[in-house]
Image (cartoon, rainbow, N blue to C red):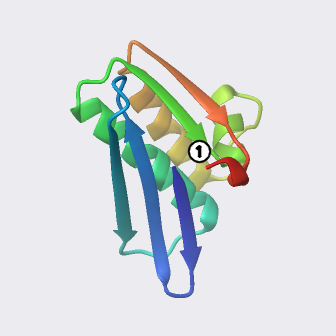
Amino acid sequence: MDGASSEEGSGVGLKLINPDGQEFTYAIKMNFKSTNNEAEYEAFLAGLRIAKKSVVKFFEAWVDSMLIASQVSGTYEAKNDTMASYLSQAKDLMQQFTSYIVVHIKRSEN
């Protein structure tokens, strides 16, 4: 998952891979301004929502956002209302899976 924000707008990209190795790639343009952290969370939430609709039971997310990985694990706290809202939405969605894991990877690995 990846999110980006610039003068021209914001967007997210994500790839979902099922247990058989089949890949599903998504690109989503956002119609609102966002920071890079917000765009990263939007990508993460989009992946969770798509997986939930696909009746996924186990969700493994590989994110290049240290912020998301650390907030989800409880290592970092959400220090403002916007990040707290994103974290709350993520936790609500993650509870709907039988199990989940969020792994931080370096940007060069995705």
Q: Specify whether 23 is left or right of 14.
A: left
Residue at horizontal 56%, vertical 68%?
4
Report the number of discs: 1
Q: Nearer the viewer, residue 11 or 90?
A: 11
Please provide percent x and percent y for residue 49.
32, 40
Q: Specify whether 75 is left or right of 30.
A: right
Residue at horizontal 69%, vertical 41%?
105
Q: In the displayed image of the protein, which residue is found farthest to the right? A: 75
Instruction: Identify residue for label 1.
Output: 84
Q: Nearer the viewer, residue 75 or 99?
A: 99
Q: In the displayed image of the protein, which residue is found farthest to the bottom? A: 7
Please provide percent x and percent y for residue 21.
38, 31
Q: Specify whether 54 is left or right of 51.
A: left
Task: Indicate whether 103 appears above or below 98.
Answer: below
Please provide percent x and percent y for residue 98.
39, 12
**Dot 1 amino acid type:** Ala
Residue at horizontal 73%, vertical 38%?
77
Please provide percent x and percent y for residue 24.
32, 45
Mark 1 surroundings: few (<14), some (14-19) or many (≥20) residues within 10 A = some
Task: Indicate whether 66 appears above or below 10.
Answer: above
Q: Secondary structure at mark 1?
A: helix
